[in-house]
Amino acid sequence: MMANLFSTFDPTTFLKLSLNWLSILIIFFFIPSLFWLIPNRLNFMTLKMLMTLHLEFKILTKKNNTLIFISLFFFILMNNFMGLFPYIFTSSSHLVFTLSFALPLWISFMMYGWLMNTYHMFAHLMPQGTPPILMPFMVCIETISNIIRPGTLAIRLSANMIAGHLLLTLLGNTGPMVNFLIFIVLLIQFLLIILESAVAMIQSYVFAILSTLYSSEV
């Protein structure tokens, strides 16, 4: 049962290639339309969201270079939403996908901080007002918290996407066994779809906002 349950997250292979990962490229079919279609409601909503994110990230970073975080938000958001459609591979539920964003960002932040702002990075290991007896412990705690940041970013996103899909799979498997409660099961699945849509937006926003906060510290 568990093997069949988690097999929904296994990429199918053909000629030794995991073709399900090609679902990441679906987003690129929607980008060119913004360059030749007349302004529509979808275009207006996208631009409005982009400007809102730019202003918010600009306050956190105190700089105008927010393009990488906005692009990261939209890319993860589209992949999260694509995973909600039937028979489309959920790439954001795999640590390979999430770590490929979290780890390079964290490494670049750490390299820039320790090479360009070494004194600030050392000062960040010791919060202001720490009692002298707790200083060695605070240095260890801050060091560990910095090291585990890419793992927490990646695991948070993948775990939230896996949890909702597992619930939908469980309800889908129990539907034929409870014919007299099929309408209740369908209602619960409909509510879970709405919840998963909210989770897809929230998790992409959390990933982008945490990356912005980590960059502002260096």
Image (cartoon, rainbow, N blue to C red):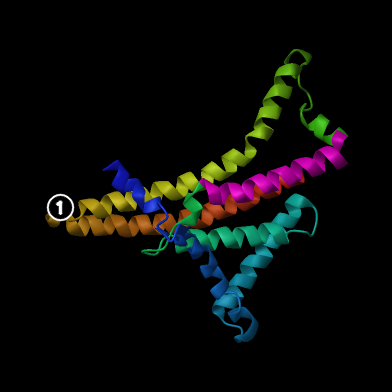
Please indicate whether residue 151 sits to the left or right of residue 84 in the image: right
Q: Which residues are magenta?
A: 95-118
Q: Identify the image quadrant of the N terminus.
A: top left
Instruction: Tell me the element at label 1.
Output: loop
Residue at left offset 49%, top offset 56% = 91
> What's the residue type where badge 1 is placed?
Val
Where does residue 54 sit, x and y in percent of width and height?
70, 61
Queried whether the magenta region covers residue 126, the answer comes back as no
Please indicate whether residue 180 sits to the left or right of residue 157 in the image: left
Question: Magenta part mainly helix, strand or loop?
Answer: helix
Q: Identify the image quadrant of the C terminus.
A: top right
Queried whether the magenta region covers residue 107, the answer comes back as yes
Q: Is residue 80 visible?
A: yes
What residue would you read off at disc 1? 178
Q: In terms of image quadrants, where is residue 111?
A: top right
Where does residue 160 sit, x and y in percent of width and height?
46, 47
Residue at left offset 51%, top offset 69% = 26
Please indicate whether residue 5 sits to the left or right of residue 45 in the image: left
Residue at left offset 78%, top offset 15% = 132
Mark 1 closeness class: few <14, some 14–19, many ≥20 residues within 10 Å? few
Please tell me how many numbered marks the rendered image carries.
Answer: 1
In the rendered view, would you say 33 is above or below 71?
below
Where does residue 168 sit, x and y in percent of width and height?
33, 53
Q: Is residue 218 visible?
A: no
Residue at left offset 87%, top offset 42% = 116
Please indicate whether residue 92 sits to the left or right of residue 7 in the image: right
